[in-house]
Amino acid sequence: MIQVQNLSKSFQNIDAVNDISFTIEKGEIFGFLGPNGAGKSTTLHMMSALLKSDTGTIHIEGKNSHENAEAYKHLIGVVPQEISLYEDLSAYNNLIFWGKLYRIPPRKLKDSIHTTLELIGLLDRKDDLIKTYSGGMKRRINIAAALLHNPKVLLMDEPTVGIDPQSRNHIFEVIETLNAQGMTIVYTTHYMEEVERLCDRIAIIDSGKIIAQGTQSQLKELVQTKENIQFEFHSLSETHVTQLRQLLPYTMTHTKNKLLVESTVNELSTIITASNKLQLQIKDIHLNKVNLEAIFLSLTGKQLRD
Amino acid sequence: MILTILKKDLRLYFSDKKGIVITFLLPIIMITLFAFAFGGVVKKKSAPKPISVLVVDKDVTTASQALITKLNAIPAIDLIPTEEEEALTLVRKGKNTAVLLFGKGFSEAVATDTKLPIELKYDAARDLQMQIIHSILKEGFNYHLGKGDVINTVTINTTSVIKEASTKAHPGLVQAVGGTAIMMLLFSIAAIGGGLLDEKEAGTLKRLLIAPVKPFDILLSKMGTAMVVSILQLTAMFVFAWLAFGLPIFMDIVTLLLLIFCISFAVSSFGVFLVSTVKTRQQLQGMSTLIIILMSAIGGSMIPISMMPAFMQNIAVISVNYWGIEGFFDIFWRQLPLLEILPKMGILLAIGLGMTLISSLLFKKNIIAIE
C-alpha cells in the first residue's frame, strides 16, 4: 500500500533523513520509534507532501506525493504534532472548515463530522470553543480533523504529546477502532509503550536512518539480551542455588540474596514452586523484559529519551 | 541588587533588535524627514530648488517680458511661460501650484502708475506653498518697479482656480481624512497579514498546506480578507467624515468607491508583502512600524506633500499614501472626472500587482518553508 524508497532530506548539510526505505501493508499500524531529532517528523512531513524529498520516492496506492499531489492528499489524513486548530472557533466550526478544504459535499460533511465526533467521544461538546477544551480533548479534535474525508492512510505525528494517561488511552482506543475498520496507520512517537501497544511493525529510527524494522518479536531477536526474572530472597545460600539448578532448567546467576533467572514471565510460577519447595522466602520479584527501550539501547548505545 | 536587575534588563533590551530599531532608528528617520519637510536642512552654499510657477503674458509687451525675465532671475522661483488655458488646467489638476497672469494693459498701467492687471491663480489645496509664492512675487514686483513703501505697493490679486462651494470639501479636511485613513489602514492590514504568522506558529498553516490547497491560494485568501477589511474600514472612515464633518462623499460616489477599491488592493498587497518578508511576529512588528511610518511620512499622510521640498515630493510617488491622497483630492477638491483619476487608480493597482507577485515568491521562501 505504501512504498517509500531511498528517501533522503537534508537541511543545511545536516542529514535529517538519510536514504530510508520501507513498505507498509494495507491495514497495518506502522510505528516510527526514535528520540527527538531522529528524523521521524521529517519523514512524516515528506509523506504528508508538505516537504519535498531531496532524493527517493513515496507512493501510496501507486500515487506519488508530488506528481499526483491532489489525489495523493485525498488518500491521506494527517494528524500534526501541534494542535492545529482555531482556538476561537467551536469544534464543529473547525471541522466544517477543515472538511470543506477537501471539497466534501455539505450533507456528507455533516454526517462525517457527526460520526467522527461520536468516535472520539466529543459529540456533546461540539459547539464549545476549542480554547475551552482540555489538552486531551484538543488532541482528539486534532485527530478528528484528519478523518473527515475518510482517508485510507492516517499519518500521526506524536499525537499524544503532553496529555494525561486517561486521554492517551482514549486516543489509543480511537486508533484501534480506526485500524479495525481497515485504516492503515503510520504512527511516530518516542514512547516505546505506545508502539508496543499499538504497532504491528516498527521502524527504529536514529540520526535520520532506519536502524532496524520488523515486528516486535523480530526486533527482539536482533539483540543478545534475554528476558530474565530477578528474585530477592530473605536468605539464599550456595546450597539453595545448587538445589534450584537441579530443579530448574534455566541459566541462573546469584549475588548475595539475589538470583537472576534467564526465563520469561511464563515460567514464573514454576520458579516460585521450586523456591517454596526449598522453603525460600521471596522478598521481591522483578521482571526484566526485553523491550524496545532495551533494543534501542542495544542498537544505538543511547536511551530513547536522550 | 538594583544594579543586577538593571544590567539584566539592559542585556535583554539590547538583544532585541526590533526594540533597538524602534528606539533609535525610527526616531532618527522621522527627525530627518521632518527636518527636510520643514526646511530645517539647508546647505550653506547651495540654494534650495526653486518653486515652479506658470506664467501667462497676455500683455505681450516689452515691459511685461522684461519684468518676467527679471522675476525669473529670483533664485527661489522658476517662471514657466505657458498658454492660459493649459496653465489653468495644470493648476486645476494639481500639477502646478499657481499661475501668474499678466493682463492686457500691464505696460500702460506701469507707465501711468495705476493698478497693475496682475493676478495669481492658485490651487487652494496647496495653500502654504501659495503663500510663499505670493510673498516672493510681491517682493519681486515691488523691487523691480521701484515700489515697496507702506503706501505705494503692488497688489497681486489672488484667486483660487477651484472655487470653494458648500458642496465641496475643504482641502484641509480631505488631507486629514484621506491621509489619516490610509495610514491607519496600513497598520490594520499589517496586523491582519500577521495572522498568517500566527497560523504558522499555531500549526494551522501546516494543516492548510497538508490539505489539497495551493500555497498561492492561501496567500490570495489572506489578501482577500485584508481587502474586505480595508474596504470596510475606508468606507467607515469616509461615512464618519461625512456625518461628523460634512465631507461630501456622495458628490462622486462611484469614483470614490472605485478609488477605495484600488487603495484597498494596494494596501492589502502591501500588508501581505510585509508579512512575506519576515519569519516571526516580532520581526513583523518592527518592520511594519518602521515602513508604515516612513511611507506615511513621505507619502503625505503626516505632512501635506505641498509642504515638502521638491526632492521629497519626487520620492513620495513610491508610496501608496501619495496616490491615495492625490486621488481623494482629485475627487473632493479638484472634482476631476473619473477618466482623469483612472491613471492614479491604475498606478495603485500596479503597485498592488507588483507587491503580490513579489509576495508570492517570498511567501514560499519565508512562510511556508517547513523543516
Image (cartoon, coloured by chain):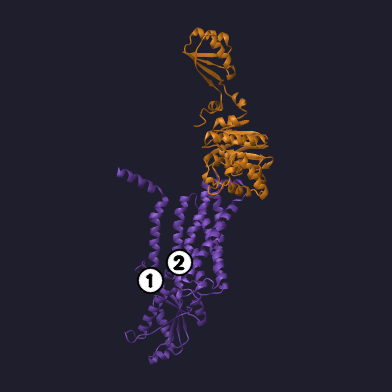
Host chain of mark 1: B
Identify the residue position indicated by label 2 in the image: B300
Viewer-side residue, A281 vs A147? A281
Viewer-side residue, B124 vs B109? B124
Same chain for marks 1 and 2?
Answer: yes
Viewer-side residue, B240 vs A286? B240
Q: Residue at x 61, y 51 (%)?
A: B214
Which chain is rendered orange in the image?
A: A
- Mark 1 / mark 2, whichever is N-terminal: 1
Instruction: Look at chain B in the picture and name its colour.
Output: purple
From this viewpoint, is residue A258 visible? Answer: yes
Using the numbered discs, state the Cα–Cα distance from disc 1 to disc 2 in whole angstroms.
24 Å
Q: Residue at x 52, y 59 (%)?
A: B270
Give, as a three-letter code, the residue at label 1.
Answer: Ala
The secondary structure type at the circle numbered 2 is loop
Identify the residue position indicated by label 1 in the image: B47
Q: Residue at x 65, y 44 (%)?
A: A112
Residue A62 quadrant:
top right
Host chain of mark 2: B
